[in-house]
Image (tube, rainbow, N blue to C red):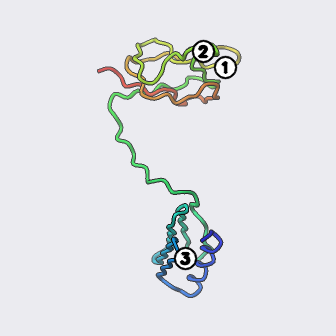
């Protein structure tokens, strides 16, 4: 069942004031329930998952047509995590020169004052140093990427 067919089906159900509808056609199963302010339609098959939300008084609109990822669970913030942010706008470089190994990698231990990366701004190379000692947990920037003021660059698990 494509988006157009699903949209037409929902419009028909609204027009006929049908509160609940279920359809199975081959490997496609569509279940629509109306109630309250919105209509929620779900179509399941071997094909991507489609969810449609329709206001009671308006035309339907497809909310998601790609394979729906599972609802992300917010990670519990871990204590002693420190975020190193960019103090300037510029270009992120993970190494001192092209082809050189990066200053740090995920899993490396760093000390206060150790260079983590370079941010180039107006032809000046600015070394970004760690302001805590600990382990690099995550690198947020990618080599050659433009970055903004305050953008997160690294997550460091501070030593206790």
Please give the residue where the numbered disc 3 appears in the rendered image: 56
Nearer the N terminus, badge 3 or badge 1? 3
Picture residue at 48% right of the left edge, 75% below the top? 31
Residue beneath the point at 41% across and 23% down: 107
Whole-number angstrom distance, CA of label 3 to CA of label 1: 53 Å
Q: Residue at x 52, y 30 (%)?
A: 140
The x, y position of residue 17, in whole percent, is 53, 86
Circle 1 SS class:
strand
Q: Residue 122: image x %, image y %?
A: 70, 18
**CA distance separating discs 2 and 3:** 56 Å
Asked whether disc 2 touches disc 3, contact meaning CB atoms under 8 Å apart, the reply is no
What x and y, as percent, mark residue 63?
57, 62
Q: Is the Cβ of the residue at disc 3 closer than 8 Å to that at disc 1?
A: no
Q: Residue at x 39, y 21 (%)?
A: 135
Question: On the rendered image, what quadrant is the C terminus found in?
Answer: top left
Instruction: Find disc 1 in the rendering and name its residue.
Output: 121
Mark 1 touching mark 2, by CB under 8 A? Answer: yes
Mark 3 surroundings within 10 Å by alpha-carbon count, few (fewer than 14), some (14 through 19), many (20 or more): some
How many numbered tags mark residues here?
3
* Earlier sequence position, callout 1 versus callout 2: 1
| Nearest to the observer: residue 126 or residue 16 | 16
Q: Secondary structure at mark 2?
A: strand
Q: Is residue 38 visible?
A: no
- Classify 10 Å Cα crowding around label 1: few (below 14), some (14-19), many (20 and above): some
Q: Determine which residue is flagged by label 2.
A: 126
The alpha-carbon separation of the residues under discs 1 and 2 comes to 7 Å
Q: Is residue 96 above or below residue 135?
A: above
Q: Earlier in the sequence, mark 2 or mark 3?
A: 3
Front residue of 104 and 36: 104
Please tell me the numbered disc located at residue 25: none
């Amino acid at each position: 069942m494509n988006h157009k067919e699903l949209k037409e089906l929902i419009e028909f159900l609204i027009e006929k004031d049908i509160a609940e509808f279920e359809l199975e056609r081959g490997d496609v199963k569509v279940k629509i329930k109306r109630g309250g302010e919105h209509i929620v339609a779900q179509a399941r098959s071997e094909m991507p998952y489609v969810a449609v939300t329709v206001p009671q008084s308006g035309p339907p609109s497809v909310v998601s047509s790609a394979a729906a990822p599972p609802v992300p669970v917010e990670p519990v913030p871990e204590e002693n995590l420190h975020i190193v942010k960019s103090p300037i706008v510029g270009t992120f470089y993970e190494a001192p020169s092209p082809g050189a190994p990066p200053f740090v990698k995920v899993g490396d231990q760093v000390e206060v004052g150790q260079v983590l990366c370079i941010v180039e701004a107006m032809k000046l190379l600015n070394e970004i140093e760690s302001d805590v000692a600990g382990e690099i947990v995550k690198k947020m920037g990618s080599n050659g990427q433009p970055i903004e003021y305050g953008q997160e660059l690294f997550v460091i698990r501070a030593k206790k």
